[in-house]
Image (spheres, rainbow, N blue to C red):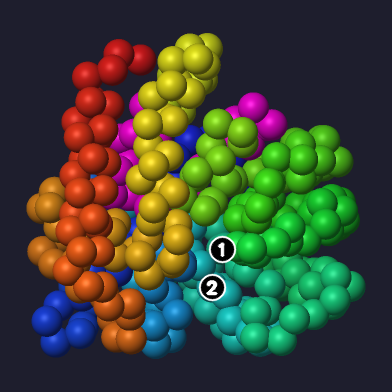
Amino acid sequence: MLRLNGITPVMCTPFLADDRIDERGLRTQIDFAIDNGAAAVAGPGFGSEFYKLTDGERCRFAEILVEQTRNRVPVIVATSKDSTSATLELSRFAERIKADCVMITPPRTATLPVGQIIDYYSRLCDQLSISVMLQDADFTGAGLPSQVFADLSRKYQNFQFAKLEVLLPGKKCAEIVEQTEGRVQVIYGLGGIAMMDGLRRGASAVMPGAAVLEVYVRAYELYRAGRIAESKAFFNRLIPYLSFVLQHLELAVGTEKKIMAKRGIIDHPRMRHPSLAFDPATEELIDETADLALALCEEAKTVSA
């Protein structure tokens, strides 16, 4: 079964002036990620503005991920919908195009009790052969109990991954690893801001965006090489950037796109409407923050592993 170890970035969705997906820019971004150390590529997730894409666009995004990756690294396709049947439809599509894993959040529009959530993932795992990742995306809370992951792991071999995007994820990470005896690998999300905590607690991968990928890869490599203090010192210099952009999802995605455009990976940092609008002072701050992150990327290339 699939194993994930390293940095597994979510691709952003570049847009053309007429609001269509810039497929060439998406392909360039995928190549950039793989060439710079991505252990896998993922999308279309929150960082891809999936919530603004049609189902047809989500399928096309997934097709491009698989086509452009060309089996160089695993492909994780986000297939979340608010019904079991709709999620299964997208997930089966991901299976057909030979993706390696589907990433699925619990239904979001109507909050459900834990028992119903377990039943939801049970039905999905029972009808899919592809690896399943539960994206525990509770950006302002504690998310699902660790027992949910343990229960599903005992029942389904293809239930393999927990992506934690919750507050203070460390204790839950350690519990999942212990309770599943390592069968469920934990991936840290939320821009990877708690990456150092995750590695210490047994997380195997981190899923940020790709704009400053080299920083995450270098910090991960240093950590795995046993140079933990050096890894922490280096990664902690990215925290001001992450603290700034994680104030709002659209700010995070927009800044990632601005950095991608500055680097020539995509042509333009367009966001699909509706999106946040910023006054000139905030735009200037975004540019300054992006430049600081870019400088750290350049430094990452010179740090010996």
Q: Which residue is mark 1?
A: 102
Which quarter of the figure is the N terminus placed in? top right
- Determine crowd level at label 2: few under 14, some 14-19, many 20+ residues with C-alpha closer than 10 A: many
Q: CA distance from mark 1 to mark 2?
A: 6 Å
Q: Disc 2 marks which amino acid?
A: Thr
Q: Residue at x 43, y 21 (%)?
A: 233
| Range of magenta residues | 199-218
Q: Residue at x 29, y 86 (%)?
A: 273
Q: Which residue is mark 2?
A: 79
Rendered image quadrant of residue 155: bottom right
Q: Would you place residue 301 above or below residue 257 in this image?
A: above
Residue projecting furthest to the front: 281
Asked if disc 1 and disc 2 are in contact, CB closer than 8 Å, the reply is yes
Q: Residue at x 26, y 33 (%)?
A: 296
The one of 184 and 280 positioned closer to us in this rendering:
280
Q: Residue at x 26, y 73 (%)?
A: 278
- x and y, in percent, of residue 86 in the image: 60, 86
Q: Is residue 147 left or right of residue 29?
A: right
Q: Would you place residue 118 above or below residue 197 in this image?
A: below
